[in-house]
Amino acid sequence: MANVKMFKLLGVLLALMLIIWAIAPFLRHQAITVDVMATAIILILIAVAYFIILYNPSWTKAVFFFEGIVIAVSGYMLLDYPYSLEFVIVGLIIIVIAILAYLQKLPPSILKWFYR
């Protein structure tokens, strides 16, 4: 069974990997398009959310809500038509899950991830 320190270490490694993936196109001198910028913004903000949740688990619901907003808005503003709708839908689903977690209307098996 994994202990809490190992879980935090793996979370930090995942967050750092997301940041590296986000900045890799800029370091490789690829053409910077709005798709690359949208992906970089989303990956970096998800990595920052991992850091926040790892060291302050009581903020899980707020960070989840914020991530839903970021995914929906950046996908809608930066991506072309079919992809923008997919990102808006995913972002709205995440926002609804965060609101239901605040209201404690989710099944207990899911609520345990929001109330640690």
Image: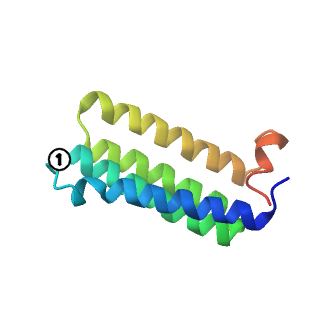
Which residue carries the number 1 mark?
33
Q: Position of residue 20 (x, y in %)?
A: 39, 59
Quick check: 11 left or right of 78? right
Outermost residue on the top side: it is: 82
Which residue is painted at 68% across and 65% down in the image?
A: 8
Looking at the rendered structure, the number of numbered marks drawn on it comes to 1
Q: Residue at x 39, y 32 (%)?
A: 86
Q: Position of residue 114 (x, y in %)?
A: 73, 54
Q: Quadrant of residue 79?
A: top left
Residue at 59%, 68% in the rendered image: 52
> How are the colours assigned in the image?
rainbow
In the image, farthest residue toward the bottom: 55
The residue closer to the viewer here, 63 or 101, is 63
x, y percent for residue 73: 36, 49
Question: Would you place residue 34 above or below residue 116 in this image?
Answer: above
| Residue 80 found in image quarter | top left
Q: Decide if residue 104 is on the left or right side of residue 75.
A: right
User: Where does residue 69 sit, x and y in percent of width and height?
Assistant: 45, 52
62 versus 105 height, above or below: below
Q: Quadrant of the C terminus?
A: bottom right
The residue that appears at 47% across and 57% down in the rendered structure is 17
Q: In the picture shown, does residue 20 fall above or below 77?
A: below
- 32 w.r.t. 58: above or below: above
The amino acid pointed to by label 1 is: Thr
| Depth order, front residue of 44/23 | 23
Q: Is residue 74 left or right of residue 89?
A: left
Crowdedness near tag 1: few (<14), some (14–19) or many (≥20) residues, C-alpha within 10 Å: few
Task: Indicate the secondary structure of the residue bearing disc 1.
Answer: loop
